[in-house]
């Protein structure tokens, strides 16, 4: 493929993420303590308020996946006895640890001083940290975050999590850092979070324009990087989202479509909504299948995995612990299937999409459970066709490029047939 084209915000994003990995590699020398935690429901502001550094194991796996280096890690973990059915993020992480715990940028990762689980909707997370606890013999704090069985977080749910923050987590962070919680500092950080969140929402909602100035799935995963990792509550995060928003607004003014690795996308021929994560090991190849066809993803659920801001949530500095508790329960996969269907229907309608695509990843039950039902329901309610693709997150054995490309092309042809008045129904695509 030709040289990758990047805009200014993407360069800045790259610098932020690589600076973050640099800070992890020198954490021990710098006397910084480290908290391993996960993206959904992460409590970055609280961790940072104690001057602790968050490490996100699934980001390490994802970044390694994008560098096509997870295949061997997964095989090594399977050889060590982990089943083929286990989530490949976990096996990539375990393989990475066995290979010396070198991070995706080639620099050593620090060992955890604490394992913090602040979202319990995925059972795998619990098992993953049980394995890491064995490995590192370090303390663990597991918050119990109620599932949105009724499609909302009730005051009782919120208070239950606040109580755990007060009684379990904050004392553990105080002990680890040797500091008392500075609530004013936490509030300042939460103010910065909300500023960045406003700009992120504006960026995602820009996709309502025609042509959309962004790709909200393939491009969107870069946009959520700082927000869902270590930069919420920081001035660097605010600056990044301000720059990104300004760039996107300029693209609208110029009538430009999304920027792709090969430059500006030309004509927008198809507008799609995406459900599920993309594949990471063939990320560029997968994206190219879309932009070569003039297909832009105008809204995606995956980019809400660390928070559904476009439905109104913002960190509220006036209620610091309550807002953190609400955030823990707000991530996309903590929502029940009817709420997820409502979200997708809204996206298809509000973003005037031609259809929607579900990438059902083998690894992740949190995403994949119920997706066939979601496909049928969203088709029924919107009257627009869906496509069902199966691949994986970071296991290259489960990405069948030729098959996926053929079926995607067939799906897009079907949308064209619909425009011409033909009969349409969904497509299922297996590896
Ligand atoms: S099963 Fe899904 S949510 Fe759970 S750790 Fe794996 S990828 Fe993450």
Image (cartoon, helix red, strand yellow):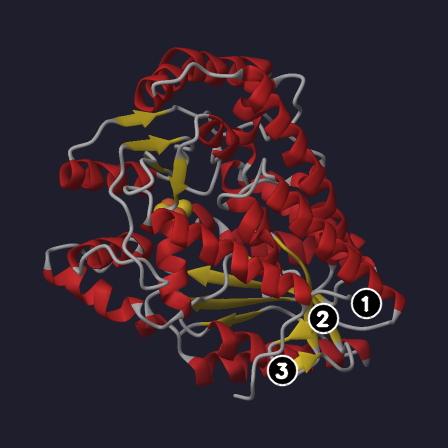
Residue 229 on image: x %, y %? 49, 46
Instruction: Give the mark toward the camera: 2 or 1.
Output: 1
Q: Quadrant of residue 150?
A: top right
Is residue 427 among the parts visible in the rendering? yes
Dot 2 or dot 1: first in sequence order is 1
Q: Is residue 164 left or right of 355 when viewed as pictured?
A: left
- Front residue of 179/146: it is 179
- Local crowd at mark 1 within 10 Å, few (<14), some, or many (≥20)? some
- The residue identified by callout 3 is 262
Q: Tell me if 153 is positioned left or right of 56 in this view.
A: right
Do the residues bearing badges 2 and 1 touch, measured as CB atoms within 8 Å? yes
Residue lying furthest left:
80
280 in relation to 348, above or below: below
Residue closest to the eye, 419 or 89? 89
Viewer-proximal residue, 376 or 358?
358
Place of residue 60 in the rendered image (x, y in percent of width and height, measured from the top left): 36, 55
Point 67% across, 17% down: residue: 318
Label 1 sits on a secondary structure element that is helix
Residue 227 higher or lower than 65, as above or below: above
**Mark 2 to mark 3 CA distance (whole Å):** 11 Å
Q: Earlier in the sequence, mark 1 or mark 3?
A: 1
Q: Residue under label 2, please give it.
A: 258
Asked which secondary structure carries label 3, the reply is: loop
Q: CA distance from mark 2 to mark 1?
A: 8 Å
- Spatial CA distance of label 1 from label 3 is 16 Å
Please report the residue visible at 73 percent of the width from the left and 74 percent of the height from the top. 270
Residue 172 in percent (x, y) is at 33, 19
Q: Which residue is mark 1?
A: 251
Q: Is residue 305 visible?
A: no
């Amino acid at each position: 493929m030709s040289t990758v084209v990047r805009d200014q915000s993407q360069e800045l994003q790259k610098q932020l993420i690589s600076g973050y990995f640099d800070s992890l590699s020198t954490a021990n020398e710098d006397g910084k303590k480290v908290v391993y935690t996960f993206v959904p429901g992460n409590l970055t502001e609280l961790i940072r308020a104690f001057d602790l550094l968050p490490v996100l194991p699934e980001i390490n796996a994802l970044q390694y996946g994008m560098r096509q280096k997870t295949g061997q890690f997964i095989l090594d973990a399977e050889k060590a006895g982990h089943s083929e059915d286990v989530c490949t993020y976990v096996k990539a992480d375990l393989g990475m640890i066995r290979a010396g715990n070198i991070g995706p940028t080639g620099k050593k990762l620090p060992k955890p001083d604490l394992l913090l689980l602040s979202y319990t909707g995925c059972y795998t997370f619990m098992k993953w940290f049980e394995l890491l606890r064995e490995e590192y013999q370090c303390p663990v704090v597991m918050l119990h975050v109620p599932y949105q069985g009724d499609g909302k977080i009730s005051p009782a749910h919120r208070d239950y999590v606040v109580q755990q923050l007060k009684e379990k987590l904050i004392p553990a962070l105080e002990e680890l850092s040797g500091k008392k919680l500075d609530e004013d500092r936490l509030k300042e950080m939460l103010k910065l979070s909300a500023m960045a969140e406003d700009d992120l929402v504006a960026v995602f909602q820009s996709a309502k324009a025609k042509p959309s100035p962004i790709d909200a799935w393939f491009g969107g995963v870069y946009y959520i990087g700082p927000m869902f990792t270590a930069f919420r509550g920081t001035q660097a995060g605010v600056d990044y989202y301000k720059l990104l928003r300004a760039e996107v607004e300029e693209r609208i003014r110029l009538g430009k479509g999304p920027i792709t690795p090969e430059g500006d996308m030309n004509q927008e021929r198809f507008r799609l909504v995406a459900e599920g994560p993309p594949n990471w090991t063939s990320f560029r190849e997968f994206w190219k299948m879309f932009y070569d066809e003039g297909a832009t993803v105008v809204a995606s659920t995956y980019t809400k995995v660390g928070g559904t801001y476009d439905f109104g949530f913002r960190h509220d500095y006036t209620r610091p612990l309550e807002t953190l508790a609400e955030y823990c329960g707000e991530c996309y996969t903590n929502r029940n299937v009817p709420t997820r269907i409502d979200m997708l229907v809204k996206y298809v309608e509000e973003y005037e999409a031609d259809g929607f695509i579900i990438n059902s990843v083998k690894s992740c039950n949190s995403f994949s459970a119920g997706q066939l039902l979601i496909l049928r329901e969203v088709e029924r309610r919107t009257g627009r066709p869906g496509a069902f693709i199966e691949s994986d997150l970071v296991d290259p054995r489960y990405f069948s490029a030729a098959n996926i490309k053929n079926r995607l092309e067939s799906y897009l042809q079907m949308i064209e047939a619909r425009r011409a008045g033909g009969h349409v129904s969904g497509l299922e695509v297996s590896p």
